[in-house]
């Protein structure tokens, strides 16, 4: 897969989101809300970066808001389960409240579409997003309160560094 094709997949993923979800991702208040939550729960800069990463992965529908978000936050934030539960409750109330139903429904529809096209020979979008997530966690330092443009710059770097993993991926 060429780098240009990979970038197009990312753009396509964003463009296929409902306008309400897209609006949250590009809204400057999104970062402000995450910073406020990081301050409320006294998160370290690294923990705040993971909160941003995992919340963004929920918004772009790579991480299921009910099935994976809790466990991924718990793994990376390394906080008591009751604190993780409170953080998720605040994220749902302050950031996701108007779109959480859409995100859940999109996962249901994606599962149906994935089963229908399981014989595809193309690299799946979930694999591509997972590669980006791994690279962000391992290769791109999480910085507290960085801007969306910085996040997108980091994401562009991840695209480049992940290409070899994606090129070598084979669908069974």
Image (spheres, helix red, strand yellow):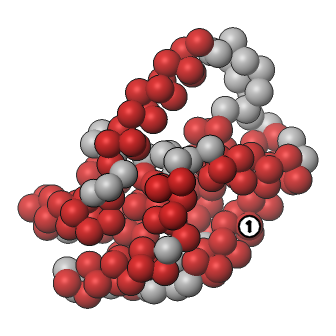
* Residue 103 locus on image (x, y percent): 40, 43
Q: Is residue 4 placed above or below 106 in the rendered structure? A: below
Q: Residue at x 33, y 65 (%)?
A: 95
- Label total for image: 1
What residue lies at 79% left-to-right and 37% top-to-bottom? 168
* On screen, residue 121 above or below 83: above
In the image, taking residue 45 as reference, residue 134 lies left or right, namely right
In this orientation, does residue 78 appear? no
For the point 73% across and 32% down, which residue is it? Answer: 123
**Residue toward you, 25 or 119:** 25
Q: Residue at x 65, y 38 (%)?
A: 125
Q: Is residue 70 visible from the viewing direction of this image? A: yes
Look at the image and tell me in which quarter the N terminus lies. top right
- Residue 63 picture location, percent across and down: 43, 46
- Residue situated in front as seen by the camera: 111 or 50: 111
The answer to whether residue 69 is above or below residue 126 is below
Q: Position of residue 98 (x, y in %)?
A: 32, 55
- Describe residue 157's horizontal placement relative to residue 135 as left or right: right
List the residue tagged with mark 1.
156
Dot 1 crowding, Cα within 10 Å, few <14, some 14–19, many 20+: some
Q: Quadrant of the C terminus?
A: top right
Q: Judging from the image, what secondary structure is the residue with disc 1 in?
A: helix
Expressed as whole percent of the image width and height from the top left, the position of residue 54 reads: 42, 60
């Amino acid at each position: 897969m060429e780098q240009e094709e990979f970038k197009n997949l990312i753009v396509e993923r964003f463009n296929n989101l409902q306008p309400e979800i897209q609006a949250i991702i590009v809204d400057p208040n999104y970062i402000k809300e995450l910073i406020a939550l990081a301050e409320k729960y006294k998160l370290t800069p690294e923990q705040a970066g993971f909160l941003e990463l995992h919340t963004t992965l929920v918004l772009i529908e790579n991480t299921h808001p009910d099935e994976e978000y809790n466990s991924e936050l718990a793994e990376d934030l390394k906080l008591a389960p009751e604190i993780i539960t409170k953080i998720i409750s605040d994220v749902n109330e302050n950031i996701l409240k108007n779109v959480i139903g859409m995100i859940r429904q999109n996962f249901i529809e994606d599962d149906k579409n994935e089963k229908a096209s399981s014989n595809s020979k193309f690299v799946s979008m979930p694999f591509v997003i997972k590669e980006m997530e791994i690279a962000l966690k391992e290769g791109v330092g999480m910085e507290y309160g960085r801007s969306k443009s910085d996040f997108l710059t980091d994401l562009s770097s991840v695209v480049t560094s992940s290409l070899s993993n994606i090129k070598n991926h084979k669908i069974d």
